[in-house]
């Protein structure tokens, strides 16, 4: 066998394993089982799984926020993380509403303390494409040194009014 070809194949395999992302299972990432696996904490119900909110599959999460005081809140079941590792979340969302909602990473310590609580240091991104069409979003962050778990937080802003649909969440980890 050609040694150059063998060496090249081994190098490609090694680089692929080093630089490939690892899928991290999220419980009910497409809301096909309603809101199972998601902790919905709202004073007034705003977040529901519906067929009309589906990007793919049979359901997605529909957030209808008409409350000018309180926002919606849906937190995924947490998954274990490794400090210093990069985590990337992709998901789909659609809205016609301006400045209504965001998705954030909530990193927790071993005592379930939210890292960055009360600061602007929680990684997240606002849903900014307001054409009413589905748009794929990507959120990437490095797990802090004290992080042991990660939750995905979907929420509408407390003074916002509007609706947003979310679906097809996928979490990966890289180097």
Image: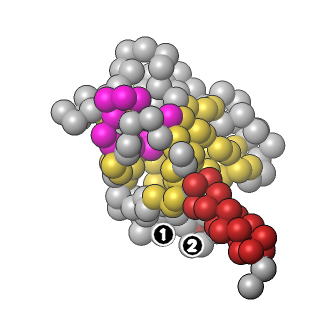
Task: Let me know if residue 109 is in the magenta part.
Answer: no
Magenta segment = 142-153
Q: Quadrant of residue 117?
A: top left
Asked whether the viewer can see residue 1, the reply is yes
Question: Does the image show residue 63?
Answer: no
**Which numbered disc, 1 or 2, marks the residue that appears first in the sequence?**
1
Q: Which part of the image, by quadrant, shows the C terminus?
A: top right
Find disc 2 in the rendering and name its residue.
58
Residue 175 to residue 67: above or below: below
Judge from the rendering whether residue 97 lies leftward or rightward of residue 41; answer left or right. right
From the top left corner, tell me how far across and down residue 170 is, in percent.
55, 57
Question: 166 above or below 119?
Answer: below
Q: Which residue is mark 1?
A: 32
In screen coordinates, is 123 left or right of 128?
Answer: left
Give left or right: position of 107 versus 59.
left
| Residue at x 60%, y 40% (from the top left corner) | 139
Mark 2 surroundings within 10 Å by alpha-carbon count, few (fewer than 14), some (14 through 19), many (20 or more) = some
| Left or right placement of residue 92 versus residue 122 in this view | right
Locate residue 127, reporting x and y percent: 66, 36
Residue contact between numbered discs 1 and 2, judged by CB atoms under 8 Å: yes
Q: Quadrant of residue 151?
A: top left
């Amino acid at each position: 066998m050609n040694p150059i070809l063998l060496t090249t194949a081994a190098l490609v395999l090694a680089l692929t394993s080093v630089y490939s992302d690892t899928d991290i299972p999220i419980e009910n990432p497409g809301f096909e089982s309603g809101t199972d696996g998601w902790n919905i904490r709202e004073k007034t119900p705003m977040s529901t799984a519906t067929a009309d909110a589906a990007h793919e599959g049979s359901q997605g999460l529909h957030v209808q926020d008409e409350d000018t005081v309180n926002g919606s809140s849906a937190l995924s079941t947490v998954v274990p993380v490794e400090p210093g590792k990069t985590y990337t979340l992709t998901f789909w969302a659609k809205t016609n509403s301006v400045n209504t909602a965001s998705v954030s990473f909530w990193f927790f310590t071993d005592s379930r303390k939210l890292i960055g609580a009360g600061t602007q240091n929680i990684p997240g991104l606002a849903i900014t494409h307001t054409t009413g069409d589905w748009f794929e979003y990507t959120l990437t962050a490095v797990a802090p040194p004290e992080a042991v778990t990660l939750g995905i937080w979907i929420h509408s802003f407390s003074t916002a009014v509007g609706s947003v649909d979310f679906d097809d969440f996928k979490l990966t980890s890289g180097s």
